Image (spheres, helix red, strand yellow):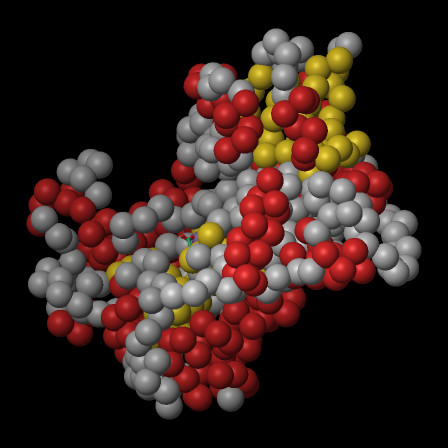
């Protein structure tokens, strides 16, 4: 085999690019001649921008002040995280860590992989700097070819990034180039890192297991109570989620004609998510028939049949990265059968009892307990007592065979928000104004469960809505969707 001169040249060219830190050049990319490289350095208009602050910037600044106050004299490092390879040289869509978003108010497509927020202790507080990638330079230098050659970060490949000055204006945070990060993390300063998000940061800062676990918990608990801007974002995300459910009902009939109708449902919802927001808060669960008994059915590769139920559990993530999380269980034909309605009505009654228990000062566990009491008693009325008398023993909770998960969770930047909060502030805590949470009881009779009558097997029902705890109660953010069986049927009839 004869190697062409071009191949040889290509390899040495790549070696130079690697030395220059130019990543993301594919093996199938063509050689760039010296003349072309020189040409790329000239002839560009000045396209600098004067950006106004992003809408959430002032709120993020308040949160940074709380972090600063909590960790006096310590350096705090919060990476955004980076790109994750899907396969070979294609990555998943970038989504920064929620703690990073919370402290920067960074928005959707503007977010830059491998950014790092550093709180440097000075005096009684901190100087906060965002280390990030500047806009691709056009005029040569170490990274000179990035803008046309780097398929991960180059402007001609993935779009324009802000300059450092533009980012500083938009977020109201001092900025510096990520290339300066190593120097910034030097010296003998007590440092806590949000670990596992950035390999360079992890390598530069020795681990401090307990201190870092404490930081993670603190950042998670900082998100428990939402401010008014966050509530606005959640209203928007839930509003788009509701619109996605309307879209789906409009497509139900068509879905019944397709071998993989669940995929049509998924695609219909996902289109709304991309249209209105950044994308999905979590992979859409489109579960028809017995698939509804699988709590997180995301294969979505089954048919949608007349006579079956469709359980759709989905959430639009807004450009601010806040997400909705709503579930409806719909009769595909537009009308519940008697047995489907019996199950639906019991879940509806459980959800109603859970909702009635939402108020500031209530224990977080109250709404779950209220919903489960209704389920437990309802099943008892039906004569469904798995385990017989043992089911009456306190804490046996054998009814959970049919409803294994908790009745809800905090909602915010993450679908299961504040996941690193301590139990005393979350599961064993007390509801406060500004908490946003889901109430989502369900009943799932597995198709092979011999403890239930045959007519129930393969029926799964979940109803999920999103609530804001207020000073005197709770507001449903997803009230744009009907909840009761009659209302669901009327709604479906109106959209057909
Ligand atoms: N919507 C998915 C879940 O809450 O687990
Ligand atoms: Mn949920």
Image coords of residue 77 (percent x, y): 61, 26
Eyeballing the image, is 171 above or below 243? above
Examine the rendered structure and indicate whether residue 50 appears above or below residue 249: above
Instruction: Give the percent coordinates (x, y) of residue 450.
Output: 9, 63
Residue sitting nearer the eye, 21 or 51: 21
Q: Return the residue nearer the eye: 87 or 269.
A: 87
Image: 297 above or below 120: below
Tell me the quarter of the picture where residue 276 sits: bottom right
Q: Quadrant of ligand 1?
A: bottom left
Does 56 sit left or right of 257 as displayed?
right
Residue that appears at 63% across and 21% down: 185
Task: Using the image, determine if residue 257 lies above or below residue 104.
Answer: below
Q: Which quadrant of the rendered structure holds the N terminus?
A: bottom left
Q: Is residue 216 left or right of residue 106?
A: left
Number of marks drawn: 0
- Give how far across and how far down residue 291 sits, in percent: 28, 68
Does residue 204 appear to the left or right of 210 in the view shown? right
* Residue shown at the point (43%, 88%) measured from the top left: 253
364 with respect to 122 (left or right): left
Residue 234 seen:
no
Residue depicted at 77% across the width and 47% down the height: 140
Query: Can the viewer see residue 199?
Result: yes
Q: Residue at x 32, y 49 (%)?
A: 405
Residue 267 rendering spot, x and y as whole percentages: 48, 74
């Amino acid at each position: 085999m004869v190697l062409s001169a071009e191949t040889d040249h290509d390899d040495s060219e790549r070696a130079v690019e690697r030395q220059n830190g130019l990543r993301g050049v594919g093996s199938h990319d063509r050689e760039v001649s010296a003349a072309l490289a020189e040409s790329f350095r000239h002839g560009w208009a000045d396209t600098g921008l004067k950006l106004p602050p992003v809408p959430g910037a002032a709120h993020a600044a308040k949160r940074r002040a709380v972090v600063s106050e909590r960790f006096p004299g310590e350096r705090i490092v919060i990476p955004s995280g980076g790109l994750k390879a899907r396969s070979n040289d294609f990555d998943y869509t970038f989504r920064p860590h929620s703690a990073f978003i919370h402290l920067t108010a960074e928005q959707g497509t503007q977010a830059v992989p491998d950014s790092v927020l550093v709180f440097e202790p000075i005096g009684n507080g901190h100087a906060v700097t965002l280390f990030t990638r500047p806009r691709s330079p056009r005029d040569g230098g170490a990274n000179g070819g990035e803008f046309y050659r780097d398929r991960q970060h180059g402007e001609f490949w993935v779009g324009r990034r802000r300059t450092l000055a533009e980012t500083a204006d938009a977020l109201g945070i001092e900025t510096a180039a990520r290339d300066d990060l190593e120097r910034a993390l030097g010296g003998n300063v007590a440092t806590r890192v949000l670990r596992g998000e950035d390999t360079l940061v992890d390598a530069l800062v020795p681990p401090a297991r307990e201190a870092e676990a404490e930081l993670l918990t603190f950042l998670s608990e900082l998100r428990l109570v939402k401010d008014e801007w966050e509530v606005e974002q959640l209203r928007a995300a839930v509003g788009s989620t509701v619109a996605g459910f309307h879209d789906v009902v409009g497509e139900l009939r068509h879905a019944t004609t397709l071998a993989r109708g669940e995929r049509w449902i998924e695609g219909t919802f996902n289109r709304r998510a991309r249209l209105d927001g950044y994308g999905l808060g979590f992979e859409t669960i489109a579960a028809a028939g017995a698939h509804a008994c699988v709590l997180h059915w995301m294969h979505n590769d089954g048919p949608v049949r007349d006579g079956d139920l469709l359980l759709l559990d989905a959430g639009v993530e807004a450009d601010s990265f806040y997400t909705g999380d709503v579930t409806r269980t719909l009769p595909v034909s537009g009308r519940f059968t008697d047995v489907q309605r019996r199950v639906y009505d019991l879940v509806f009654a459980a959800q109603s009892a859970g909702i009635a228990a939402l108020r500031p000062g209530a224990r977080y566990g109250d709404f779950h307990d209220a919903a489960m009491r209704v389920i437990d008693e309802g099943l008892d009325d039906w004569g469904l007592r798995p385990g017989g008398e043992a089911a009456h023993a306190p804490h046996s909770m054998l009814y959970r065979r049919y409803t294994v998960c908790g009745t809800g969770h905090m909602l915010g930047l993450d679908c299961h928000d504040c996941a690193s909060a301590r139990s005393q502030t979350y599961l064993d805590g007390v509801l406060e104004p500004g908490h946003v949470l889901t109430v989502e009881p369900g009943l799932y009779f597995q198709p092979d469960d011999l403890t239930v009558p045959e007519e129930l097997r393969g029926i799964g029902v979940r109803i999920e809505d999103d609530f804001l705890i207020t000073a005197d109660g709770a507001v449903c953010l997803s009230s744009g969707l009907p909840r009761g069986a009659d209302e669901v049927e009327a709604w479906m009839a109106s959209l057909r």
